[in-house]
Image (cartoon, rainbow, N blue to C red):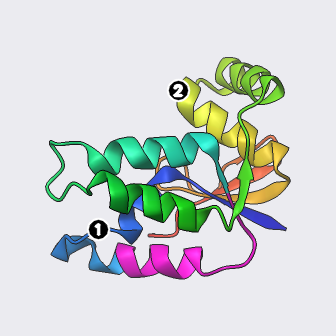
Amino acid sequence: MRAFLDTNILLYSISTAADEERKRMRAIALMDRDDCVVSVQVLQEFYVQATRASRADPLPHELAAGLIKTWLRFHVQENTVPILQGALEIKRAYGFSYWDSAIISAAREAGCSELFSEDLSHGQIVEGVRTVDPFR
């Protein structure tokens, strides 16, 4: 089964913070898998967060865009109307933010059984997708 990577996994993979070294290594190991899925939303969020001027170590546009191009080797789940509708249902049913709900909806649509993220409750199963906090 496929594994969906949330934005924080991609961001940790580029972290230069000494206190995030363990997370960086774990994120890189996850991204070495052959069964990873990301969504257009995840790639967009990565770009915005990685290049923001207030970040301690902002990436230049060329580097961030180059990383995204590299990550197109993963299965990339497009943003679609069914994902939007699914996100709205997940938000209503579980009370997550819209953006977290869209991530879960995209993971489900892509056929993922696991969602790697530190932003949701470890072990929680939503719509058949189990959240795994890989940094626990």
Residue at 59% of width from left, 23% of height from top? 95
Circle 1 SS class? loop
Type of the residue with mark 1: Ser
Q: Classify mark 2: residues with Cα within 10 Å, few (<14), some (14-19) or many (20+).
A: few
Q: Is 14 left or right of 32, judged from the image as shown? A: left
View extreme (front): residue? 62
Label the magenta part by its dominant secondary structure.
helix
How far from the left and from the top, in percent, is residue 71? Answer: 58, 64
**Numbered tag placed on residue 97 in the rendering:** 2
* Residue hosting label 1: 15
Residue at 50% of width from left, 41% of height from top? 44
Q: Is 90 left or right of 64, judged from the image as shown? A: right
How far from the left and from the top, in percent, is residue 33? Answer: 66, 79
Q: Is 52 left or right of 116, judged from the image as shown? A: left
Q: Is residue 9 visible?
A: no
Circle 2 SS class? loop
Task: Pick whichever, 121 or 63, lies toward us.
Answer: 63
